[in-house]
Image (cartoon, rainbow, N blue to C red):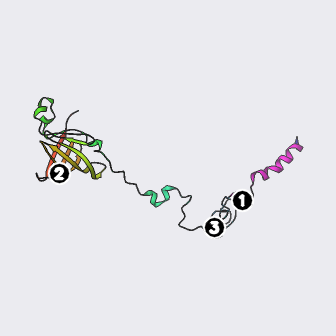
Amino acid sequence: MKSSLIPLLAALPLLACTPAADKADTGEVIAQQGGVGDGPTGRVGNPVAKGAEKGPIPDDIDEGVAPAANSAANEAAPAAKPTSIPARFHGRWGLTANDCKPEFASAAKGLMVVNDSRLTFYESRGTLDRIDSWTPANRFTANYGFSGEGMTWERVVTFERNGAKLRRTEKGGDEGPVDLTYTACPA
């Protein structure tokens, strides 16, 4: 049995080691930066990939750098601007508590209903044209085309939500500026 183990033990170091020349042929890096013994082959100096010119790797190459270490990757990409009214602004909103009560629905002049593309009021409707600016957490400004009582007009409306309160400000049109605060109607 001893005689059969000797060739196997003699071959083991050969199986575990791959000469540096073989690594260069497969395109692997020959050595890592650092001193004696720092690289996988024990060679000294800057890495040189197969086919590359001799010399250090330029500093502007970030191959192999994890995205977290790349300063450009650390910058948070802004969220995409919405194309419809954000869901956190949807619902029924009243200027007074009675605007939200079903028994007063026919006289709820302060009720505003918001869905993904429309604002509905007592005698008018506003259809979303485009969103001009927004803050994802609680605010957006958009242009609306309004109609009501046989007339049409455009207004720039800003909504700002703070909990159960919704502030609506408007610019444009003949009525002058609007600044109203609504309360969310109970579901």
| Residue 170 badge | 2
Magenta residues, as a range? 2-26
Name the chief secondary structure element in magenta.
helix
State the residue position of label 3.
46
Q: Position of residue 22 (x, y in %)?
A: 74, 58
Disc on the earlier residue, 3 or 1: 1
Q: Amino acid at mark 2?
A: Glu
Element at label 1 = helix
Q: Residue at x 15, y 32 (%)?
A: 101
Give the number of the mark in front: 3 or 2.
2
Q: Which element is circle 2 on?
A: strand
| Residue 145 shown in magenta | no
Find residue 25 and name its label: 1
Residue shown at 25% from the left, 48% from the top: 129
Q: Position of residue 38 (x, y in %)?
A: 65, 62
The one nearer the camera, 148 or 74, is: 148
Q: Nearer the viewer, mark 3 or mark 1?
A: 1
What residue is rendered at 18% in x and 46% in y? 146
Question: Which badge, 3 or 2, is on the more N-terminal residue?
Answer: 3
